[in-house]
Image (tube, rainbow, N blue to C red):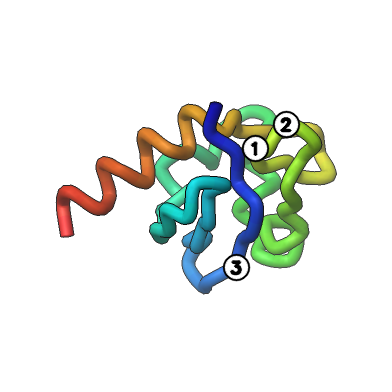
Amino acid sequence: MNAVVAIKKINNYKIHLEFKDGFECTVDIRPLIGSGLTNELLKPALFKKVEIDSGGGLVWPNGFDICPNYLRRLAEHAEQTV
């Protein structure tokens, strides 16, 4: 199972992820936010409150979360397009 073990917040809704197996990549979360529950994450102050949840995914104070398996797919796709 994929699990994020460390994050570094970067400007413009990007987050650098380090996974349990050592894989690292920066992902752009912006395409995933902006409507419904995620609309308030467009506020940089709230977006920066992201944390790693107990399952190794990302979670924000408003309850929005992203599972680690999906994050890994995003990260691998981002790496392939660089």
Q: Are marks 2 and 3 in contact (CB under 8 Å)?
A: no
Under circle 3, the secondary element is strand
Q: Residues within 10 Å of mark 3 (few under 14, many from 20)?
A: some
Between circles 2 and 3, the one closer to the viewer is 2
Q: Which mark is residue 57?
A: 1
59 or 5, which lies in front? 5
Query: In the image, is residue 19 above or below residue 10?
Result: above
User: Residue at horizontal 49%, vertical 28%?
Assistant: 69
What residue is disc 3 on? 9
Q: Position of residue 70 (x, y in %)?
A: 47, 29
Q: Which mark is residue 55?
A: 2
Query: In the image, is residue 76 above or below residue 42?
Result: above
Between circles 3 and 1, the one closer to the viewer is 1
Residue 41 falls left or right of residue 25: right
Q: Position of residue 28 (x, y in %)?
A: 41, 53
Under circle 2, the secondary element is loop
39 or 32, which lies in front? 32
Q: Residues within 10 Å of mark 2 (few under 14, many from 20)?
A: few
Of the numbered discs 3 and 1, the one sitting upstream in the chain is 3
Give the alpha-carbon distance from disc 2 to disc 3, as whole Å.
19 Å
Of the numbered discs 2 and 3, the one sitting upstream in the chain is 3
Looking at the picture, which amino acid does disc 3 mark?
Lys
Looking at the picture, which amino acid does disc 2 mark?
Gly
Q: Position of residue 17 (x, y in %)?
A: 52, 56
27 or 13, which lies in front? 27
Q: Are marks 1 and 2 in contact (CB under 8 Å)?
A: yes
User: Residue at horizontal 27%, vertical 49%?
Assistant: 78
Residue that protrudes farthest toward the right in the picture:
61
56 or 20, which lies in front? 20
User: Residue at horizontal 43%, vertical 58%?
Assistant: 24
Looking at the picture, which amino acid does disc 1 mark?
Gly
